[in-house]
Amino acid sequence: MTRKQKRFAVIFSALGVLGAAVALVLTGLSEQVTFFRTPTDLVTPAAAAQNEGRLRLGGLVVMGSVETLDDARVEFAIEDANHAVTVRYGGILPDLFREGQGIVAEGSLQPDGTFYADTVLAKHDETYMPREVAEALKEQGVWKGGLPGEGASAGDGY
Amino acid sequence: MIVELGHYALVLGLALSLAQMVVPMIGLRMRDARMIAVAPPLTIATFLAVSVSFAALTWAYVTSDFSVRNVWANSFSDKPLIFKFTGVWGNHEGSMLLWILTLALFGALVAFFGANLPSRLKAAVLSVQGSVTVAFALFILLTSNPFERMSPAPMEGRDLNPILQDIGLAIHPPLLYLGYVGFSICFAFAVAALIEGRIDAAWARWVRPWTLVSWLFLTAGIAMGSYWAYYELGWGGWWFWDPVENASFMPWLIGTALLHSALVMEKREAMKVWTILLAILAFSFSLLGTFLVRSGVLTSVHSFATDPQRGLFILLILVVFIGGSLILFALRAGTLRNGGMFHPVSREGALVLNNLFLTTATATVLVGTLYPLLVEAVSGEKISVGAPYFNYTFIPLMIPLLMAVPFGPLLAWKRGNLYAAAERLWLAAALALVAALVMAFVLYDAPVLSAFAYFVAFWLLIGSFADLWQKAGFAKNGLAKGWARLKGLPRANWGTALAHAGLGVTVLGIVGVTTFEDETVLRMTPGETTSFAGYDVAFNELTPGKGPNYTYDRGIFTITRDGRLIGTVEPEKRIYVASRMPTTEAGIQSVGLFSHYYVALGDPPESGEGIVVRIWWKPWVTLIWYGSILMVIAGGISLSDRRLRIGAPQAARRRREPLAANATPEPAE
């Protein structure tokens, strides 16, 4: 192999890997991302297609709505200023899941209008409101608090 | 008083690090030997000042001085002593102080152990390191002062976030920081080389031990964090592809690439420019990680204090250091001459391949991590990029890399023989195939895809030893002589083989737990028995009780298999007194050597008719962390290689035993 050929071999294999990576990233980003929705978005969608696939639903847990079903699943409702959506979750709720607190549920919307979640995120830090939830509520004029994270600070030491 | 002393020491540390940054740099410009020589003592003085500051904050925590706002917000007088210590870095301000302590520590280590460094290079390195210390000392003093007092002093503190009251916190952040911040030394060496305009194989030899140290601490830190999340969060997950996890994983990937490219530079003087770039990038990713974690621009499942204003300051630091070093790189990289040509099929070629895949994989992780920010900035749409994306892009890029790993050490420098390497690996391939088939079809009755995944893991695990096996030459030399040859091999060879095998063990654990894990959620009342994944779980009782600063409900479960007792687990649901925060303590029972039976409790019922119990069967899960431990040990072994320990190339060549030289078919270093 000449010097030139060696260089080409390296450059072409690099381009090959990069090309494959770019293809993976582009398809991955178009197919595998999760959109954030508020209860209002789910109840009154601008287009039904917007609520297909995997979604993150964020809002406040309705007071008194948490109920354990017979099959050990949990049912609760998430609300924003205007609407509430019923969520079913098969698992143990995070420690900081509380009624009245902002949480994010990840899963998909069922045809009957309930939301089946496989993941529920509540922060370890009780003063924390998930950022999307805080912003969505602020847009609707409900959230009167400051920005997330203001006040006390507690972190896991990073 | 002591608290004020700590504050004062931190300001002093800022002043000293400012001097550490400025004086040697002027000395280098003016060729003033005295100003150059002052760098090491200044660095050590900075370290001492910062240590005093850290000790003062620790003292405030241990004595529960609640007049200090930071202590009040994160401590409690009844808290066990160990958590009073760990509480120091269990919050934003204290953890930044730990950051800067680590930074100063690494500078001091270079000053202390760098006797054989040329004085100009050493001064330049310490000056760059000083500039990073200045930036972070300013950050702490201006935005996150841990020594702030409050008056009147409260009687009792608000307690440390209960999830952090765990031994995992004692170990995880310091390890992670040693890794994260350790890359600042590589960064300082890279920038110093660019400033001095000189770089050679000796440079790589000085940088490699630091890279290795950082890498092994980062490996340990990430593994520890993963294990901590696994047992403490009670979700049974060991990796979530969460932004905070990615923030530590990206420096690890780049650091791994740097470790390998520095090897090429040390042996062959090739890939100089690339190695410099990687050294800059490794620390840039550490800074980016700090920014992502601290600013809270991305929603994470892990806790952290977020504050946009502080985030902005770190962003500024990030822009100055990354931007500055990359501009310097662009200006100076052209002046660095590249050495040694090589054939694409060679040790260098294999290491280029390694770098290619690792940096590409880092880029896909970076894109996935930052994409939500980009989309929100452009369209206002809020999205999250989670595990599906990362598995989809990262795993396909890793498989070819993992398959190629056993070939690397078998290829000669300059020009290797792929066919000969393959010939030496057929036995490993055959063994891996058999092991994979046994695992997948006999033990678990699994689909074809998981058999392939098992093959990759076993191939990596077994193939990693092919190099040692070949060098020992048991067939040719007999057992005794072969063993003697093995013992005579440079430790770096052992390090390579063990690190690659450790990776194989981790991959095996990942494959095992991903393909065969099982979980169930059910409601149980005391006295009830359920059957799951081939085991019987009896819920004996649910007892309330009281710990030092919390109350708990403890479930006692007995796990049996065909009437044989496997063990008893006691998962708890705790409520911490001061903060009224609940936490879950999972009950974990080891089954066999590597598997776990994992039981977590849900919320106690309001009416007494049973409690929600979540049970996981986690086959082979501990291999994930055993593999990481193996990698860390391998790093340590490699670090103890005399070539790195002695550092100076001439000395190493003179003292090397003839036996080791014979056993290594590498060109003279």
Image (cartoon, rainbow, N blue to C red):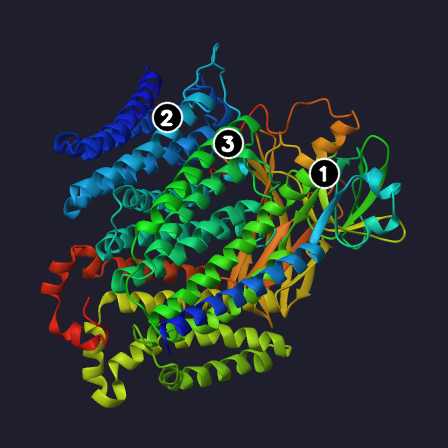
Q: Which of the 4 image quadrants contains residue A46? A: top right
Q: Quote the CA–CA distance across marks 2 and 1.
A: 42 Å
Work out whether disc 2 and disc 1 sit on a shared chain: yes
Question: Amino acid under label 2?
Answer: Leu
| Chain for numbered disc 3 | B
Mark positioned earlier in the residue sequence (3 or 1): 3
- On screen, residue B23 versus residue B364, left or right, reads left
- Please indicate whether residue B613 sits to the left or right of residue B344 in the image: right
10 Å crowding of disc 2: few (<14), some (14-19), many (20+): many
**Reading the chain from its start, which is encountered first: label 3 or label 2?**
2
Above or below: residue B199 compared with residue B433: above
The residue located at (45%, 55%) in the rendering is B253
Which residue occupies 64% across, 57% down? B389
As drawn, the residue found furthest toward the top would be B152
Q: From the viewer's perspective, tell me whether residue B337 is left or right of residue A61.
A: left
Could you tell me which residue is drawn at 56 percent across and 61 percent down?
Answer: B394
User: In the rendered view, would you say A123 is above or below B621?
Assistant: above
Q: Position of residue B607 (x, y in %)?
A: 77, 41
| x and y percentages locating residue B420 in the rendered image | 36, 85
Mark 1: secondary structure:
loop
**Label 2 close to label 1 by CB (< 8 Å):** no
Secondary structure under tag 3 reads: loop
Tell me the crowding category of disc 1: few under 14, some 14 to 19, or many 20 or more residues within 10 angstroms, Cα based. Answer: few
Judging by the rendered image, the residue that carries numbered circle 1 is B380
Q: Amino acid at mark 3?
A: Leu
Q: Is residue B178 visible?
A: no
- Which dot marks residue B57? 2
Q: Chain of mark 2?
A: B
Badge 2 element: helix
Screen quadrant of the C terminus of chain B: bottom left
Q: Which residue is the site of mark 3?
A: B160
